[in-house]
Image: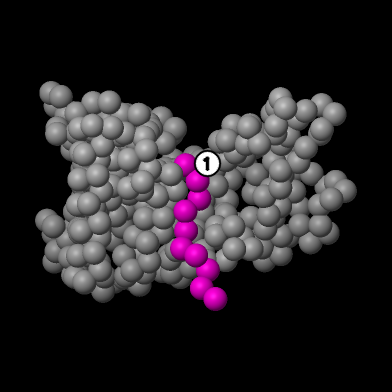
Amino acid sequence: MSGRITDRLGGAERDEALAFLDQAQRFYAAAGAEDLANPLLYYYSFLNLAKPLIRALGFGGSLEVAVHGLSNKRIGEGSSPKDFEVKVQHLHGEQVNVFVELSDKLGFGRPAPGTSYNIEELMVEMVVGHRLWREATQGRERFVPIADVEILQDATASEMWIRLLVEREDVDRFGIGHTQTLREGRLIDDFRLVKEEGVPAECFGMEQLSAINYGHRPSDKLPDLVAPLREPLWRIVTSDPERSYRKYYLHLTPPEVPRLPQLLALWALLFHYGSMVRYQPHVFAAMTRERHGAFIREFVAAQPEQMLYLFASEMCEREVAKPAIA
């Protein structure tokens, strides 16, 4: 990330971004050594990391008046996830909302001030810890793993498109229909189910409805081809080179339930836990002892490293992961 900042920025903007990056690294290192305070330290690490990221992606305003962009609010009387929400803040004066700017620069639009996200719904969006959430709530499976992402080509028409493959067993064992996968995966408007030659018998396929035209080199259009999948596909970082260091999932969300893109959901939930540690440590301690405690501990232990590599991938505009260990 340091190299990317140096390549893309110059002068005072480069120095500012590198200073934020250095502070992010220091907070991250401190969080690894401090158990009780680490949600707060991790959050401040990513707050400082978001600032050079939005700068590298084209933000030109002042970061000296930047604010978190979210507020933590209790909406119930207990300490369960349903009793809390995070809300997008209204700005005052020349303040910069880091959460809104991050969403905008990642291509996900600008959440409106006052928009709220219930904590339980944010928990549902976490790949790591999802089984723990299901056990605590008896909720239904929300993640379907993608067996393969294929790029198909018609050289005669100079067109290419994407096919997603899902193993039938992964949906059948949870009673999830193929059309339901398409609809709740938020692909229903852009993809169709296919049972064509080339789809393995153990899988079903979902293909893009609209192909992309390319000129002399198909590779020039790859960023445009995959851009529509950045929001509906969830990913985890792996050390498996055979899977290109990533494993992809569809998040199945009922149509009436709002959801955030993966990286923003991670940010918002980490903000919530960090805020609880800072302002209501006794409530946070109680939360870790209740039925969602295993999920919270798993989230704090495993998700910051996932977030770090997702942030690095956005900064460098390519997949970044730890190398496989021989």
Q: Percent x, y for residue 121?
A: 40, 51
**Residue drawn at the location 41% of the way across and 55% of the way down:** 309
**Foreground residue, 95 or 86?**
95
* Residue at figure coordinates x 77%, y 28% from the top left: 158
Give percent across and percent down for residue 37: 17, 65
Give the class, few, some or many, for how many residues have Cα within 10 Å of label 1's Cα (few <14, many ≥20): some
Residue lying at 75% horizontally and 30% vertically, measured from the top left: 159
Q: Nearer the viewer, residue 262 or 176?
A: 262
The kind of residue tagged 1 is Arg
Q: Which residue is mark 1?
A: 230
Q: Please tell me in which quadrant of the rendered image residue 14 appears.
A: top left
Q: Magenta region, mostly helix, strand or loop?
A: loop
Q: Where in the figure is residue 189, as x and y percent of width and height?
A: 64, 32
Query: Is 170 above or below relative to 271?
Result: below
Q: Is residue 254 visible?
A: no
Residue at position x 19%, y 70% in the image: 34
Examine the rendering and report whether any part of residue 152 can be seen.
yes
User: Is 148 included in the stretch rendered in magenta?
Assistant: no
Q: How is the image coloured?
A: one colour
- Residue 261 to residue 31: above or below: above
Q: What's the magenta region?
A: 317-326
User: Which corner quadrant of the image does residue 87 belong to?
Assistant: top left
Q: Is residue 282 left or right of residue 79?
A: left
